């Protein structure tokens, strides 16, 4: 077992002492690259530079894909027994736990997640990877029994080289949870993290090496989306691309696949998840707390954030008053203080995006019940919880993913109307239904077009451990299965083998 780090008491001092390595990790080591250009990552709580990183491009992606392909063909990983791979994936989980503080601190510095949340994320990531390790040898093949004179088998094999393009909202967590299922079933991986927050993902290569994952199996290349990301998505020797990010980029990736080699895609794109509250519920305080938690967790920068509150007209005033009261009490703080629960938005770009959505909502006639506009901007990206009422389903604030602490309130009179509003966006990621009527809960679980429907809990609240559950986004929220055994299967392909002596 690796030694756990000692707990720093002063995160600012720990941050000042950090010397993060911005170089790509290719072929089992850090490599020097001469890109001639670089990009800065910036602390959104202060505006200070965190690191200068190299703008890797097509040549670096080429080196990483070649390294991944060579490792795959060598069989050093792809031909290991699934149980042996599982052991190394478990060793990786131990590495994540042992380096949780450094990974968490890097995310806090680059995208502003409060340190306590970032540490919690790394604990969860460790558990998630342990679950993946346990599933590594549980993908069973099939024997098809139709012809007694033959054995027809359906076997699963890894695809080969998997590209992963990840976002900035949970940098290390999403990097880990996207890459490890692909590795667990024998693929090699090239990861391109978000340019807003790459440092924690760049660290993962060293953890993989320490866990005994062979050189070249896991490569990490920093760079801009339109350059390094596009080069990976267009590469003809990448078999599968797994992505989490915006729907606009997801669409581009589908085009890139068509333009290159028809690589398989697993896409987890945006969401505009409804929180639907029926008048039979008993405890409006608990529901208000969950709704505010759902829209303020990670400053609303969560793809499954319940950003649309659909409430029955008869209880709307009572519930909305409670929501506004709680949301008003959520104050932004220094993400390096362990007591802080609500940090800044992740970047200046994100601040402008939230600002423009809030302006559009006001222009389109929504009533602002709570204004989160910061008093003074400075170099920081703080934005407080914002609540709009009198929202109609066609408004931008009700249709587009904002990725900020902005809640749109709509009312309904009947179950049919609630379903129609809930399903009335291009997205279908998650939904939450609050009702005491079991029949209604079951009906809505079927009628709502979303990859995950939660009855009576906040999906971002961490009250339910769903790491071993699989889910598949609907409509323009994405493509393909992630999570659980289904998520591991996504990184394999089926082959039919017939023996007829
Ligand atoms: P957001 O708008 O929330 O930043 P993006 O979809 O732009 O989300 O970013 C998610 C990931 O996609 C990042 O790693 C980013 O670098 C990458 N990306 C952005 N544009 C492209 C592109 N044209 N091709 C490939 N990757 C891209």
Image (cartoon, helix red, strand yellow):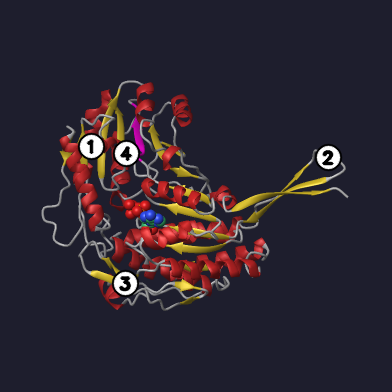
- Residue under the point 41% across and 49% down: 252
333 and 463: which is toward the camera: 333
Task: Decide if residue 421 is in sight here.
Answer: yes
Circle 4 packing at 10 Å, graded few (<14), some (14-19), many (20+), is few
- Mark 3 or mark 1: which is in front? 3
Task: Decide if residue 1 is in sight here.
Answer: no
Task: Give the distance between the C-alpha atoms of the residues marked 3 and 1, in whole angstroms.
Answer: 51 Å
| Direction from residue 282 to residue 99 in the image, left or right | right
For disc 1, does the CB lie below 8 Å from ligand 1? no
**Which badge, 3 or 1, comes first in the chain's sequence?**
3
Marking on residue 286: 4
**Which badge, 2 or 3, comes first in the chain's sequence?**
3
Label 4: element kind: helix
**Residue pointed to by mark 3:** 37
Label 2: element kind: loop
Task: Give the distance between the C-alpha atoms of the residues marked 2 and 4, in whole angstroms.
Answer: 58 Å
**Residue pointed to by mark 2:** 147
Task: Indicate yes or no whether the magenta region holds residue 477.
Answer: no
Q: Quadrant of ligand 1?
A: bottom left
| Direction from residue 85 to residue 63 in the image, left or right | left
Q: Position of residue 123 (x, y in %)?
A: 43, 61
For the residues labelled 1 and 4, say whether their Cβ atoms are less than 8 Å apart: no
Magenta residues, as a range? 272-278
- Mark 4 or mark 3: which is in front? 3
**Residue pointed to by mark 1:** 322
383 and 357: which is toward the camera: 357
């Amino acid at each position: 077992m690796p030694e756990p780090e000692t707990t720093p008491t002063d995160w600012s001092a720990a941050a000042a002492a950090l010397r993060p390595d911005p170089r790509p990790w290719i072929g089992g080591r850090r490599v020097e690259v001469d890109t001639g250009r670089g990009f800065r990552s910036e602390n959104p709580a202060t505006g200070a530079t965190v690191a200068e990183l190299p703008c890797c491009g097509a040549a670096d992606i080429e080196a990483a894909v070649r390294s991944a392909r060579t490792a795959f063909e060598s069989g050093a990983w792809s031909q290991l027994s699934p149980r042996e791979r599982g052991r190394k994936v478990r060793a990786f989980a131990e590495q994540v736990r042992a380096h949780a503080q450094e990974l968490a601190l890097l995310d806090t510095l680059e995208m502003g997640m409060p340190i306590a949340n970032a540490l919690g994320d790394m604990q969860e990531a460790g558990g998630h990877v342990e679950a993946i390790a346990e599933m590594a040898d549980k993908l069973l093949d099939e024997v098809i029994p139709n012809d007694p004179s033959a054995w027809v088998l359906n076997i699963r094999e890894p695809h080969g080289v998997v590209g992963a393009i990840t976002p900035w909202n949970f940098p290390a967590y999403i990097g880990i949870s996207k890459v490890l299922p692909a590795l667990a079933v024998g693929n090699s991986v090239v990861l391109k993290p978000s340019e807003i927050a790459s440092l924690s993902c760049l660290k993962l290569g060293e953890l993989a090496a320490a866990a005994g994952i062979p050189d070249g199996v896991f490569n990490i290349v920093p760079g801009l989306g339109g350059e390094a990301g596009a080069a990976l998505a267009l590469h003809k020797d990448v078999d599968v691309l797994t992505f989490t990010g915006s729907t606009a980029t997801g669409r581009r990736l589908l085009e890139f696949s068509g333009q290159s080699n028809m690589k398989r895609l697993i896409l987890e794109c945006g969401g505009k998840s409804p929180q639907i509250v029926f008048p039979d519920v008993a405890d409006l305080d608990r529901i208000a707390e969950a709704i505010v938690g759902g829209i303020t967790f990670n400053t609303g920068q969560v793809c499954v954030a319940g950003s649309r509150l659909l409430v029955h007209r008869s209880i709307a005033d009572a519930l909305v008053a409670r929501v506004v009261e709680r949301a008003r009490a959520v104050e932004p703080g220094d993400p390096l203080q362990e007591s802080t629960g609500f940090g800044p938005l992740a970047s200046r770009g994100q601040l402008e995006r939230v600002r423009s959505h809030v302006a559009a909502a006001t222009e389109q006639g929504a009533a602002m019940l709570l204004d989160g506009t910061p008093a003074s901007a400075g170099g920081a990206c703080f934005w407080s919880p914002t609540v709009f009422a009198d929202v109609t389903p066609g408004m931008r604030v009700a249709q587009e993913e904002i990725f900020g602490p902005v809640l749109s309130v709509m009312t309904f009179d009947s179950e049919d109307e609630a379903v129609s509003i809930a399903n009335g966006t291009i997205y279908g990621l998650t939904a939450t239904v609050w009702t005491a009527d079991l029949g209604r809960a079951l009906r809505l679980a079927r009628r709502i077009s979303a990859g995950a429907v939660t009855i009576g809990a906040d999906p971002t609240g961490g009250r339910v451990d769903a790491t071993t559950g699989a889910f598949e986004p609907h409509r323009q929220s994405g493509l393909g299965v992630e999570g659980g055994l289904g998520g591991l299967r996504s990184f394999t392909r089926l082959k039919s083998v017939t023996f007829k002596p």
